[in-house]
Amino acid sequence: MAEKHFIITGTSRGIGEQLAMMLLERGSHVHGISRGSSEVLCKYKNYSHLRFDLSNTMGAQHMLDGILESINMNDTEMLCLINNAAMLEPLKSIEKCIQEEINGNLQISLIAPMVLTSCFIQQTENLQLRRKIINISSGSGTYPAPDMSVYCTAKAGLNMFT
Ligand SMILES: NC(=O)c1ccc[n+]([C@@H]2O[C@H](COP(=O)([O-])OP(=O)(O)OC[C@H]3O[C@@H](n4cnc5c(N)ncnc54)[C@H](OP(=O)(O)O)[C@@H]3O)[C@@H](O)[C@H]2O)c1
């Protein structure tokens, strides 16, 4: 039977972990990406995990290429990239944020999804299978909150990009 493969960022905990578990229970293959790993997901034989820091956006193409090369496309009916990982911090007013904090958040929450989307389309556009990209946003991309300007801006950017 043809397989479904989901590449999900941020599967070590939270929504990414739960989403991955739901898809694994349905028989799909999940390729998780995060710095830490999930004990519960590693028990599924259809789960593979890649430890990667998404703030390394220059290395993201190489990382995604490796995952795509590991998939047998002849047996695959659907490939899906889910950009889920994001960073909430820094949670303080903008004049208190240092450059590293602003950079770090935007690299993970906005630039990594854009780079992964670009690479995913480039590497899969000639394949004869169904492809999807899902970007996990937030109400914070629409409704500004005090002390959350970096997170809100990253999500507003992700909304526009999507
Ligand atoms: N929870 C909510 O109420 C809520 C509401 C609206 C939208 N969202 C959105 O839903 C998504 C998931 O939220 P969540 O609450 O599940 O978040 P979470 O519990 O904080 O989990 C974030 C995930 O992202 C990964 N991550 C963070 N920084 C990373 C990095 N530098 N490199 C690789 N992976 C990294 C984390 O893994 P490691 O730390 O192991 O790397 C973790 O697996 C986010 O996009 C968030 O904005 C959440």
Image: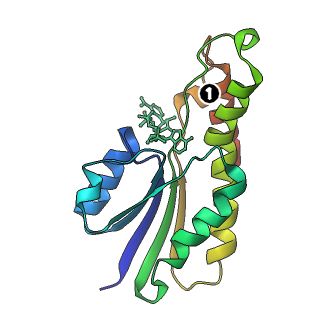
The residue sitting at 55% across, 32% down in the picture is 87
Residues 129 and 88: in front is 88
Q: Determine the image quadrant of residue 72.
A: bottom left
Percent x, y of residue 74: 46, 89
Residue 119 vs residue 87: left or right?
Answer: right
The residue sitting at 64% across, 43% down in the picture is 55
From where the camera sits, is residue 162 visible? no
Q: Which residue is mark 1?
A: 151
Q: Give the answer, above or below, for where 160 lies relative to 61.
A: above
The residue sitting at 60% across, 47% down in the picture is 54
From where the camera sits, is residue 157 visible? yes
Residue at the limit of the structure toward the bottom, as seen here: 74
The residue sitting at 73% across, 32% down in the picture is 103
Could you say whether the residue bearing mark 1 is in a helix, strand or loop? helix
Percent x, y of residue 107: 68, 40
Percent x, y of residue 63: 59, 63
Residue 33 vs residue 14: left or right?
Answer: right
Residues 104 and 117: in front is 104
Figure colour scheme: rainbow
Q: Determine the image quadrant of residue 150.
A: top right
Which three-letter amino acid code belongs to the residue tagged 1? Answer: Tyr
Q: Within 8 Å of ligand 1, the CB of disc 1?
A: yes
Which quadrant is the N terminus positioned in?
bottom left
